[in-house]
C-alpha cells in the first residue's frame, strides 16, 4: 500500500521510495517516551492576546511584540496588500472558528462550534440526508483504503497515508487554550478508533519564498484554511459510510509522528516533516476513525543523513531556534518531549520571533509567523526533472550530499537574508 499523491491536479500512487516494515525512529528511542501534554506547546504556553497560561513565558513575549515596526508599512512583504493576503489566507480557518484545530476557539465564539467539532451541528455524525446511513460492510480494507485516499485527494489533499493509531501520539491531557482546562482524550476517543488517515496540503511555493514576511504567512494561513475544509469533509464522508470519524487539525494528536508512521515523510533538522514531493512546504491534518483500513508503509528517502550534513535551516533561522550539530534525545525547553534522538526545536525562541515580526497598535496586537526554515530547505523545490534526479542521488548515493548542499547554498539564496546570513537589521 503506497501513499497517494496529487501534483498539479494529477493523482497517482508514490513509487520508487524505500518502504520500511516499521517507523525508522524506533531505533532512535533512547529513553521511554512520555505522552505529550498539549498545554506544553509554545502557543498554549504563550499565546497573546489572552490564551497563554505560563506567565514567566508570556513576560518574555509581550515586550518584544512589534519590534520590527508598525504594519502595514512601505516595505516589501509588510504592505497593506501583503497583510490583506494574509488575512484572506487565514479567513476560512478563522471564520469557521477552527483556528489551528479544536480546543483553540475564543470563549466569545464557543457557542458557534467549529468544523473540527466531534458532535453537534458541525460534527461528522450530523448527516444532511433524509435518512440515517447504515454501516457499510467492508470486506476488503485494502480496497476501502484506496477509496479513502482517492476521496482525500478529491477533497484537496496533496498527500494521503494511513496508519494504525499509536495512542502514544495522542495528547494526554489535551488542553483548552482559552478555558485553561485539561481534556482527558483517552476517555473521549473510543477504543474502536484504530486508524488515522493523515493528509498533507502543499502550500504555495512562490509565496513561501517571501519568508519571513506577511506574504509567506499568507501561504501558511491558506494551508490552515484548507485543513479546516479537508479533514472535516473527509470525516463527513466516512460518517456517511456509517463509521466514527474525528477530524483534527493540530489538535488531539501529534501530526508529525503520525505522518511518519503513515509514510508521508521523515523528520528533518527543522523539526518538521519533510516529504519527497514538497519537502517541508506542507500543512498536516488527520482523521481518526474505526473504518477498517490497511496502513501505508513508513519510508526512508535519506532525510536524516542529508540533514546531518546540511545546516541551511539553522543558519537562516532568524531566531537561531534550530539546533546545529548532532541529534540529541534531551529536551531544550518545556515544549520538547525528551527521549527520542532528533534535532529539538527551541519553540520559545521561535515564537518570540513571531511576535517581534508582528505588530502592536492601539487596536491590538498579533504575530506574523516566519516560515524561513521551510523556505530555505533544499527539499523545498517545485517538481522538476533536475530536482527529481538530485533526490534520487540523495536516496541512493548519500556520499554526494555535501555537493547538493553546497549547490543549494550557491544557487538558491532566499529573498530575505536572515539569521547568520543577515546583511541588514529590519
Image (cartoon, helix red, strand yellow):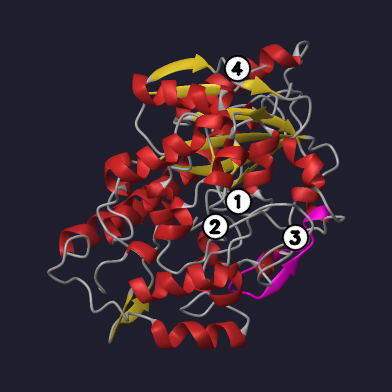
**Which residue carries the number 1 mark?**
117
Which segment is the magenta one? 173-186
Q: Earlier in the sequence, mark 2 or mark 3?
A: 3
Indicate the position of residue 221 as horizontal and vertical percent values: 38, 53
Q: How busy is the neighbourhood of tag 3: few (under 14 within 10 Å), some, or many (20 plus)?
A: many
Q: Earlier in the sequence, mark 3 or mark 1?
A: 3
User: Is residue 341 toward the left or the right of residue 8 in the image?
Assistant: right
Cα distance, mark 1 to mark 2?
7 Å
Whichever of callouts 4 and 2 sits on the residue coming sooner in the sequence is 2
Asked if residue 297 is among those painted magenta in the image, a careful observer would answer no
Eye-nearest disc, 3 or 1: 3
* Residue 147's disc number: 4
Residue located 53% across and 54% down the image: 114
Cα distance between the residues tagged 1 and 4: 24 Å
Instruction: Name the residue carrying label 3.
Output: 36
Q: Nearer the viewer, residue 398 or 237?
A: 398
Amino acid at each position: 500500500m503506497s501513499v497517494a499523491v496529487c501534483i498539479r491536479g494529477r493523482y497517482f500512487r508514490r513509487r520508487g521510495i524505500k518502504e520500511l516494515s516499521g517507523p525508522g525512529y524506533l531505533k532512535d528511542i533512547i529513553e521511554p517516551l512520555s505522552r505529550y501534554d498539549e498545554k506544553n506547546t509554545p502557543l498554549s504556553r504563550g499565546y497573546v492576546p489572552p490564551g497563554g497560561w505560563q506567565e514567566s513565558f508570556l513576560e518574555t513575549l509581550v515586550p518584544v511584540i512589534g519590534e520590527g515596526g508598525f504594519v502595514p508599512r512601505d516595505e516589501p512583504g509588510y504592505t497593506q496588500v501583503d497583510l490583506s493576503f494574509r488575512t484572506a489566507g487565514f479567513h476560512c480557518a478563522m471564520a469557521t472558528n477552527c483556528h489551528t484545530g479544536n480546543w483553540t476557539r475564543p470563549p466569545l465564539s464557543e457557542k458557534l462550534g467549529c468544523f473540527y467539532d466531534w458532535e453537534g451541528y458541525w460534527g461528522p455524525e450530523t448527516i444532511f440526508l433524509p435518512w440515517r446511513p447504515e454501516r457499510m460492510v467492508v470486506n476488503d480494507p485494502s480496497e476501502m483504503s484506496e477509496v479513502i485516499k482517492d476521496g482525500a485527494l478529491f477533497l484537496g489533499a496533496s498527500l494521503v497515508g494511513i496508519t494504525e493509531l499509536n495512542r502514544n501520539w495522542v495528547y494526554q491531557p489535551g488542553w483548552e487554550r482559552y478555558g485553561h482546562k485539561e481534556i482527558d482524550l483517552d476517555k473521549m476517543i473510543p477504543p474502536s478508533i484504530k486508524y488515522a488517515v493523515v493528509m498533507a496540503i502543499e502550500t504555495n511555493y512562490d509565496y513561501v519564498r517571501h519568508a519571513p514576511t506577511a506574504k509567506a504567512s499568507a501561504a501558511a494561513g491558506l494551508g490552515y484554511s484548507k485543513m479546516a475544509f479537508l479533514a472535516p469533509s473527509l470525516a463527513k464522508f466516512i460518517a456517511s459510510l456509517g463509521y466514527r470519524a474525528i477530524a483534527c487539525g493540530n489538535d488531539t494528536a501529534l501530526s508529525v509522528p503520525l505522518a511518519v508512521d503513515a509514510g508521508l515523510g521523515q523528520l528533518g533538522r527543522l523539526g518538521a516533516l519533510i516529504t519527497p514531493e514538497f519537502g517541508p512546504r506542507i500543512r498536516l491534518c488527520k482523521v481518526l476513525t474505526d473504518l477498517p483500513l490497511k496502513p501505508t508503509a513508513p519510508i526512508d528517502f535519506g532525510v536524516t543523513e542529508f540533514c546531518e550534513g546540511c545546516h541551511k535551516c539553522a543558519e537562516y533561522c532568524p531566531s537561531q531556534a534550530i539546533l546545529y550539530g548532532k541529534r540529541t534525545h534531551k529536551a531544550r525547553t518545556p515544549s520538547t518531549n525528551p527521549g527520542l534522538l532528533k534535532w529539538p526545536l527551541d519553540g520559545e525562541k521561535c515564537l518570540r520571533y513571531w511576535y517581534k515580526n508582528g505588530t502592536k497598535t492601539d487596536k491590538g496586537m498579533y504575530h506574523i509567523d516566519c516560515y524561513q526554515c521551510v523556505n530555505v530547505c533544499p527539499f523545498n523545490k517545485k517538481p522538476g526533472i533536475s530536482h527529481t534526479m538530485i533526490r534520487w542521488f540523495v536516496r541512493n548515493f548519500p556520499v554526494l550530499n555535501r555537493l547538493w548542499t553546497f549547490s543549494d547554498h550557491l544557487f538558491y539564496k532566499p529573498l530575505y537574508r536572515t539569521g547568520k546570513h543577515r546583511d541588514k537589521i529590519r
